[in-house]
Image (tube, coloured by chain):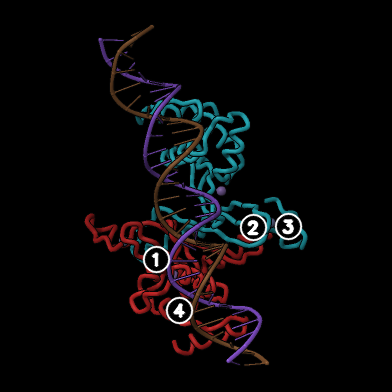
Chain colours: A cyan, B red, C brown, D purple
Amino acid sequence: MKRLLERIDREILAAGGKRSRSRAVVIEGFFRARDHVTIEELTRSVRESAPWIGAATVYRTLKLLERLGYAKELDFGEGARRYESNLSPHHDHLVCRQCGTVIEFEDTEIENLQDLVTRRHGFHPTAHRLEIYGFCRICASGESAERVR
Amino acid sequence: MKRLLERIDREILAAGGKRSRSRAVVIEGFFRARDHVTIEELTRSVRESAPWIGAATVYRTLKLLERLGYAKELDFGEGARRYESNLSPHHDHLVCRQCGTVIEFEDTEIENLQDLVTRRHGFHPTAHRLEIYGFCRICASGESAERVR
DNA sequence: GAATATCCTGAAATTGAATTTCATCATCAT
DNA sequence: ATGATGATGAAATTCAATTTCAGGATATTC
Ligand SMILES: [Mn+2]
Ligand SMILES: [Mn+2]
Ligand SMILES: [Zn+2]
Ligand SMILES: [Zn+2]
């Protein structure tokens, strides 16, 4: 973690940026936070220890992390984007519409078939998104499942 | 086409709605328009023959068509949603980031594998979205490809 | 350790798609 | 025709996201 933060710091400097306390707090907060956070959630969490931090800085910092390749922007169609760390390998998502739970999965067979499809159309893929929406095991069974979110 | 419009009309009536000139124009315009239109595009097109129609009506009508199962809302991450007719069978999309071209494809193998994944997690799927972003054949070959959009 | 150029900040203003409000009009059942 | 209610367009509102801006922080040069 320390290593990671130092590495990012160095990359920012190398790109002509400067260090800042607020940004450091946001970056560390992001990697400590649970995955698939919204800006609003992260801002709230980060403000517990650094109440002066403005939302604009959180927005800016996550865009920066995305540019550097450390974060990925997600959109589950909720009206607000989410972000996840880009350190773990590629995966796709199952999103529960009842409780908001997000299950990650990776399926190399699907990925291979996607490559076949793009090749068949002479298409050069740079990214893809596969999300499956529905109800998780818990929400699908019990009618009165807990509402986490 | 006439059949379709009459059927929709009947469903709206059955649901307690009323006929309206503006809505009829929007609905017909939607099915005549090219696929994957934005509200803005459809509004502009519809206003050529019915300049009094407000954007709110176009928004409302497409939400209605979606509720009735005749339209699907799409989001290619452009900032504005797109809509497509839901009459043709399910398919997914290749989206060119250069020229905006959208290629449709269907791959039953991928769909089957998706079912396997959800089953493996006890997840009950209700919908999914698979989009592959990149460059279409034309944009990938020529540097100076035409910018359609 | 100044001096200075440049970056970064938080607050507030702005943007822009989407939705809602509201007074008026249109449609339907009687 | 009458009355009830749905639908409309314009304008207002919402809300996430971005931009603006003046002040503050940081790196670099001497
Ligand atoms: Mn994830
Ligand atoms: Mn399509
Ligand atoms: Zn659930
Ligand atoms: Zn293209």
Above or below, B36 against A16 in this view is: below
Badge 2 element: strand
Q: Chain of mark 4?
A: B
| Quarter of the C terminus of chain B within the rendering | bottom left
- At a point 51% along the width and 70% down the height, the residue shown is B60
The quadrant where residue B142 appears: bottom left
User: From mark 4 to mark 2, how far is it between C-alphas?
Assistant: 37 Å
- At a point 39% along the width and 75% down the height, the residue shown is B52
Badge 4 element: helix
Badge 3 element: helix
- At a point 75% along the width and 54% down the height, the residue shown is A146
User: From mark 1 to mark 4, how far is it between C-alphas?
Assistant: 16 Å
Q: What amino acid type should be assigned to the residue bearing mark 4?
A: Ser
Q: CB of mark 2 within 8 Å of CB of mark 1?
A: no
Mark linked to residue B94: none
Badge 1 element: helix
Q: What amino acid type should be assigned to the residue bearing mark 1?
A: Glu
- From the viewer's perspective, is C14 left or right of A73? left
For residue A10, say whether it is visible.
yes
Instruction: Give the residue at mark 3.
Output: A138
Q: What amino acid type should be assigned to the residue bearing mark 3?
A: Ile
Mark linked to residue A96: 2
User: From mark 3 to mark 2, how far is it between C-alphas?
Assistant: 10 Å
Q: CB of mark 4 within 8 Å of CB of mark 2?
A: no
Q: Is mark 2 within 8 Å of ligand 3?
A: yes
For label 4, the crowd category at 10 Å Cα-Cα, with few meaning under 14, some 14 to 19 and many 20 or more, is some
Mark linked to residue B40: 1
**In this rendering, the label closer to the viewer, 2 or 1:** 1
Mark linked to residue B22: 4
For label 1, the crowd category at 10 Å Cα-Cα, with few meaning under 14, some 14 to 19 and many 20 or more, is some
For label 2, the crowd category at 10 Å Cα-Cα, with few meaning under 14, some 14 to 19 and many 20 or more, is many
Q: CB of mark 3 within 8 Å of CB of mark 1?
A: no
